[in-house]
Image: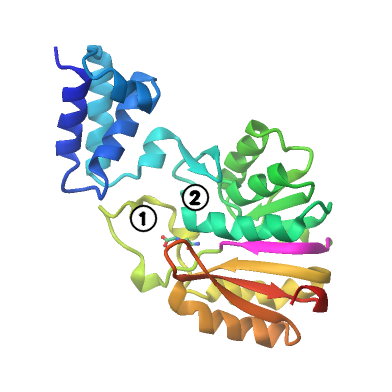
């Protein structure tokens, strides 16, 4: 029988050409197949996996070699220190979005503010804000499958009392409410730039990625109605593609001419989100 270490080495070799991180992927998938922590896999290389475990691992690594994102194979993805449930109905939460969440949490501080997360997907942004602050958060999404996952995540993290989700286009489902903070990671990839398989992004829902010809179609529509939903001194945090920042800033300036707009960078140093202060106190 092959050892854990050899099984891991075989999986790493299989993923060599298809993954940017073959060993890390193989380690996660083997740990999942064996229902063990990653640390166990590393520490017990001499152990022998069962035939079922090896078969489960081979199935997972074959799917990974065809491009399926690791998060869909594991059924979860880490975000801001929590493990969120994900499936093919939602975008895999990205590390760069943690930056936007950190800015939201800093703005909220200890205040019991009202927050809307437009296009919530897995609910990673909304649930994290609810878990880390005393704010009340509403997440919206056009996809009822996404809202089902977001609700599961809210239950998982015990935030259902202050975090709820509605199905609807952009802010349609919350149009009677007012918010102190708006966060959005709307689809922003220009249509022509959406990758095709085997790129892992191509396995994610197209409606969570496709931002129209210039990547800003959804943001343009959001700003048709957003102004009337804002409380005084509200903050808006928007994630978008680095090349679209000037275009997005122009949309914001025309909808909210008195706001202060700052472009912020992600961990990679790329211009990734806009911070829009509508009040004089948070310029
Ligand atoms: N960050 C994602 C990507 O580059 C896109 C997310 C989005 O469109 N909101 O693949």
Label 2's element?
A: loop
The boundaries of the magenta stretch are: 177-185
Q: Can you tell which quarter of the image residue 197 is in? A: bottom left
In this rendering, the answer to whether 201 lies above or below 250 is: above
Which of the labelled discs sits on residue 216, or is there none? none
Between disc 2 and disc 1, the foreground one is 2
Query: Residue 97 in the image: x percent, y percent?
Result: 53, 57
Ligand 1 is located in which of the four quadrants?
bottom left
Which residue sits at x=45%, y=74%? 242
Residue 171 in view here: no
In percent of width and height, residue 212 lies at 46, 73
Mark 2 or 1 closer to N-term?
Answer: 2
Q: Answer with left or right where residue 272 lies relative to residue 37.
A: right
Distance (Cα) linking label 2 and label 1 = 12 Å
Q: Is residue 98 left or right of residue 200?
A: right
- Drawn side of residue 158 relative to residue 119, left or right: right
Q: Verify whether residue 265 appears in magenta.
A: no
In the rendered view, tell whether residue 227 sits above or below residue 139. below
Who's the residue at 37% across and 25% down the image?
39
In the image, farthest residue toward the front: 43
Residue at which label 2 appears: 93
Quarter of the image for residue 43 reads top left
Image quarter in which the C terminus is found: bottom right
Q: Taking 224 as reference, is 181 above or below it?
A: above
Q: Position of residue 266 (x, y in %)?
A: 49, 64
Mark 1 Cα-neighbour bin, 10 Å: few <14, some 14–19, many ≥20: some
Ligand 1 neighbours mark 1 (CB distance < 8 Å): yes
The scheme the figure's colours follow is rainbow
The residue at 30%/39% (across/down) is 24
**Residue identified by numbered label 1:** 201
- The residue sitting at 66% across, 86% down in the picture is 253
């Amino acid at each position: 029988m092959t050892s854990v270490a050899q099984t891991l080495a075989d999986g790493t070799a299989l993923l060599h050409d298809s993954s940017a991180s073959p060993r890390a992927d193989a380690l996660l998938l083997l740990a999942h197949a064996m229902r063990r922590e990653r640390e166990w896999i590393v520490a017990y290389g001499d152990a022998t996996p069962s035939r079922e475990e090896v078969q489960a691992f081979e199935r997972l690594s074959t799917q990974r070699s065809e491009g399926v994102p690791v998060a869909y194979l594991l059924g979860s993805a880490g975000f801001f220190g929590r493990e969120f449930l994900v499936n093919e109905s939602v975008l895999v939460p990205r590390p760069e979005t943690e930056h936007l969440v950190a800015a939201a949490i800093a703005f909220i501080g200890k205040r019991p503010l009202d927050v809307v997360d437009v296009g919530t997907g897995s609910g990673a942004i909304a649930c994290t804000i609810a878990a880390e602050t005393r704010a009340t958060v509403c997440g919206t999404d056009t996809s009822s499958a996404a809202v089902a996952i977001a609700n599961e995540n809210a239950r998982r993290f015990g935030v259902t009392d202050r975090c709820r989700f509605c199905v609807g286009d952009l802010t349609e489902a919350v149009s009677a409410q007012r918010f102190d903070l708006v966060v959005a990671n709307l689809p922003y990839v220009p249509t022509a730039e959406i990758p095709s398989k085997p790129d892992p992004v191509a396995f994610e829902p197209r409606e969570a990625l496709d931002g129209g010809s210039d990547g800003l179609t959804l943001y343009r529509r959001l700003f048709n109605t957003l102004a009337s939903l804002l409380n005084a001194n509200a903050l808006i945090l928007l994630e978008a593609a680095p090349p679209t920042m000037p275009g997005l800033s122009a949309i914001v300036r025309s909808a909210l001419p008195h706001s202060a707009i700052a472009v912020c960078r992600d961990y990679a140093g790329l211009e990734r989100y806009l911070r829009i202060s509508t009040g004089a106190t948070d310029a």
